[in-house]
Amino acid sequence: MRFGLLASGMKPQGMPPPQSFRELASRAEELGFDSLWVADRIASPAEGLPLPEGVATLGAFVGFTRRIRLGTSVLIAPLRHPALLAKQLATLDYLAEGRLTVGMAIGENRADYAAVGVRFAERGRRADHAIEFLRRAWAAGQVSDQVWLEPKPVQPGGPPIWVGGVSEAAQRRAGRLGDGWLAYRISPPQFVDGMARVRREASSAGRDPGLLTGALMVPVHCRPDGEVARREAQESLSRRFRQAIPIEVIEQMCVVGTPDDCSRRLAAYAEVGVEEVVLVPQAWSWDPVADAEEVFSDLVAPARAAIS
């Protein structure tokens, strides 16, 4: 199992200082995370819920790092014109020397769609079209008569596309069009069921299901006292989403508890085929660098030892 870190998630108390993102990127690389991921938003659904735009943030992380793999978790593809998106992502892969993975989904924030004048009901169709366009543009460079999108990505055929989401439509899209499935907030048994559907869809489309990656983005929070960790994670997520989240949901869909609890939980995901996990720190903190150090020492290092 590979371990990634979400580096631009919402902080319930607001955005951390800008310079902390530069420090976080270099520190995550030093610590030994396998990948570094950014989220995406155009418009907040309410005041006080900030989140940076994904492509611009990832461009900064390309400059802040040298070795670590970079990804979007997840980019809301239907909000962009596919030619612009193809150009932006190809440029990022070129500048990063082939370190890009594109996690993309349709999103559930209606404010994003209202902000750019795209109909919310069309998001699935637009996502399919975007993936097909990206493949064509990245593979050929030329997308129509006298229209080229260059430079091409460093990775042949373009960076891998992992389709995010847990709906059956997202799983079908991952199987038919994606290079992997990026699930979010689901239990190990739910991951098994979803990945089976992804592979069935791939087979039905004449694709090799064994080539698809199974990945998971999951909220994490470890403390020596497991009950404290659960209460803090519940408070953090409830504030982020501005609704009370039951502790049963925290238990089922998050990695929380003592370091041993968290290692066992990640091992359970590894056993059902999760190949890469994107960890979303839930610490009530203004310091994302300290969050990353804590997650690595309390969770990633012991989990690696336990899983291996």
Image (spheres, rainbow, N blue to C red):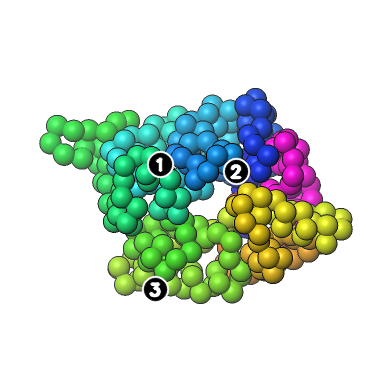
Residue at the image point whose x is 58% and y is 55% from the top: 217
Residue range of the region highlighted in magenta in the rendering: 280-306
Q: Residue pushed farthest right?
A: 225
Q: Indicate yes or no whether the magenta region holds residue 59.
A: no
Q: Can residue 131 be seen in the rendering of this structure?
A: no
Quadrant location of the N terminus in the rendered image: bottom right
**Dot placed on the residue nearer the N-terminal end, 1 or 3:** 1
Tell me where residue 163 appears, x and y as whole percent: 43, 56
Residue 171: x %, y % from top left: 42, 65
The answer for how far apart the CA atoms under marks 2 and 3 are is: 32 Å
The circle on residue 200 is: 3
Q: Is residue 299 visible?
A: yes
- How many numbered marks are there? 3
Label 1 secondary element: loop
**Marks 1 and 3, Cα distance to the nearest angstrom?**
27 Å
Residue situated in front as seen by the camera: 12 or 294: 12
- Which residue position holds label 1? 155
Could you tell me which residue is drawn at 48 percent across and 64 percent down?
166
Residue pointed to by mark 2? 9
Number of other residues with Cα within 10 Å of mark 2, as a class: few under 14, some 14 to 19, many 20 or more:
many
Q: Is residue 17 left or right of residue 100?
A: right
Tell me residue 176's x, y (percent): 34, 63
Q: Return the mark for residue 114.
A: none
Whether residue 14 sits left or right of residue 95 in the image: it is right
Side of 249 where 131 appears, left or right = left
Where residue 175 sits, quadrant-wise, is bottom left
